[in-house]
């Protein structure tokens, strides 16, 4: 099979799955959800899923566990001190770069 056709089928499949995942809740929940507990759980699901998908791969992003660990620690500290997203990204990248030169 041609690579372009494979890529097209892959994108089409991902689009279909994404659509189905978003359409199913719309068919089940037609009324507004009034339960505070269920609303709070549904509010935090995107953040939890994104964290679970992203966090493990942070440690493999640089090819060296120590540079990735330093970048992660710097990013966590910068974000906990209420820095903007661009500042957190730049500081963590600089920390990884400096640590890469040290190692």
Image (cartoon, helix red, strand yellow):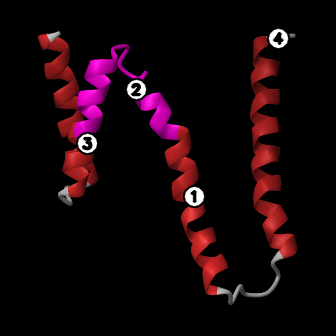
Classify residue 82 by image quadrant. bottom left
Of the two numbered discs 2 and 1 in the rendering, the one whose residue sits closer to the viewer = 2
What is the secondary structure assignment of the residue under circle 3?
Answer: helix
What is the secondary structure assignment of the residue under circle 4?
Answer: loop
Q: Is residue 90 magenta?
A: no
Give the Cα separation between the discs numbered 4 and 1: 35 Å
Classify residue 35 by image quadrant. bottom right
Tell me the tag on residue 46.
1
* Label 2 crowd bin: few (<14), some (14–19), many (20+), radius 10 Å: some
Q: Residue at x 84, y 63 (%)?
A: 24
Q: Residue at x 62, y 80 (%)?
A: 37
> On the rendered image, what quadrant is the N terminus found in?
top right
What span is in magenta? Answer: 54-73
Give the Cα separation between the discs numbered 4 and 2: 34 Å
Of the two numbered discs 4 and 2 in the rendering, the one whose residue sits closer to the viewer = 2
| Image: 78 above or below 72 | below
Tell me whether the residue at label 4 lies in contact with that at label 1, contact meaning CB atoms closer than 8 angstroms. no
Give the Cα separation between the discs numbered 2 and 3: 13 Å
Q: Is residue 61 toward the left or the right of residue 13 in the image?
A: left
Work out whether mark 4 precedes mark 2 in sequence or the reverse, and give the earlier one: 4
Q: Which residue is mark 3?
A: 75
Q: Which residue is mark 2?
A: 59
What is the secondary structure assignment of the residue under circle 1?
Answer: helix
Q: Residue at x 57, y 58 (%)?
A: 46
Q: Which residue is mark 4?
A: 2
């Amino acid at each position: 099979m041609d690579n372009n056709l494979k890529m097209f089928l892959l994108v089409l499949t991902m689009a279909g799955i994404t659509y189905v995942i978003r359409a199913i809740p719309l068919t089940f929940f037609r009324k507004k959800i009034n339960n505070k507990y269920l609303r709070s759980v549904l509010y935090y699901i995107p953040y939890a899923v994104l964290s679970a998908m992203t966090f493990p791969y942070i440690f493999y992003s640089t090819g060296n566990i120590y540079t990735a660990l330093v970048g992660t620690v710097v990013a966590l500290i910068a974000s906990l001190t209420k820095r903007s997203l661009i500042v957190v990204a730049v500081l963590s990248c600089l920390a990884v770069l400096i640590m890469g030169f040290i190692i």
